[in-house]
Image (spheres, rainbow, N blue to C red):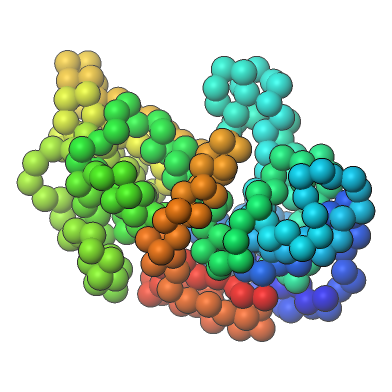
Amino acid sequence: MKALFYLGPERLELREIGKPKGDVVIKILGAGVCGTDLKTYLKGHPMFKPPTILGHECYGKIVELNVDMKSLEVGDTVAVAPYAECGKCHLCEIGVPELCKSKTYLETGCFTQYIAVSREHASRALFKVTDDPAQILAEPLACVFNGFEKLRVKPRRLLVVGGGPMGVLFALLGVSEGCETFVIEKSAWRLEHIRSLGIEAADRPPEGLFDGIIFAVNIPELVGQYTRLANDGGSLLLFSGYPKDSLIEVDSYAVHYREVSVVGSFGFALKHFERAVETLSSQVELFKRLMTHRFDLENAPKAFEILSKGEAMKVFFGM
């Protein structure tokens, strides 16, 4: 089978390797390229040592079932959660399962034709879906649901700072939830695309206050700058990944006297993934508008090139 190997910054190689063996074997039908994949490709990543296979947003068809699993059958199309919390530890019990330290994981990335999944992971992390490329959005949408859940209240007015793929996914969710939604983005290409989706967007904030402000770009100083736009009782959500030693400054008056909260979110829990799958099944036409480019694995360098230029939203590989 074909598998796309990451060999180091800006180095990819399509290789022929043996088809995997395991409890559940899945033929990948589509795999999305996320921001972490792009950052790894451009600069490397401490968690992904080359040579390795990247990719964790995928869906596919079960082609082998080598264990007895009542809920799954050969031929089922499934969205694949790349990890699943244990459900038993202290972090799971207190309501932050996305931070669980005893998760099960996929054993390989999904930029390949087939993956094998252990019975333990498959029993909790495979969700039956229809065969639609939009199913690759289940994982990123699950992360967005986790972030949205961290907001103190459902925002009447929602501001998304950063109009990349995840920022626009937040905006689409805001639209689906009936929020008055606005996106701030500097890129001319992205602004045009966001507006084509019927979402208000500009390179500077509009007038008025917002109940929820999502930071989908990792510029720490923006947090302090936008605190003034938070409504009383509103929330600032730090969604984007920030450098380890970076600091933010927030107006303490706003936090104390106006009860503006500063919260973060990281990854997803299975409840968020399940909700994402259900949402995609009922609103697929809305969310699939995020998907702008499809490539084959043979043309992977072009996929990463167009993403690095900021001239795409969700890019995916179709197998």
Residue at position x 66%, y 52% from top? 128
Q: Is residue 272 above or below residue 43?
A: above
Residue 309 placed where, x, y %?
A: 41, 74
Report the front residue among 201 and 117. Answer: 117
Residue 273 placed where, x, y %?
A: 56, 44
Report the front residue among 74 and 157. Answer: 74
Residue 192 placed where, x, y %?
A: 24, 72
Q: Looking at the rendering, in which quadrant would you find the C terminus?
A: bottom right
Q: Is residue 241 visible?
A: no
Q: Is residue 196 above or below residue 71?
A: below
Q: Looking at the rendering, in which quadrant would you find the N terminus?
A: bottom right
Residue 122 placed where, x, y %?
A: 77, 46
Residue at position x 15%, y 55% from top? 204
Residue at position x 34%, y 54% from top? 172
Residue at position x 34%, y 31% from top? 151
Quadrant in which residue 103 is drawn:
top right
Quadrant in which residue 249 is drawn:
top left
Quadrant in which residue 261 is drawn:
top left
Horizontal side, residue 264 vs residue 277: left or right: left
Report the front residue among 246 and 117. Answer: 117
Q: How many marks?
A: 0
Horizontal side, residue 75 vs residue 227: left or right: right
Q: Is residue 238 visible?
A: yes
Instruction: Give the residue at the far left of this rendering.
Output: 207
Q: Is residue 245 above or below residue 186?
A: above
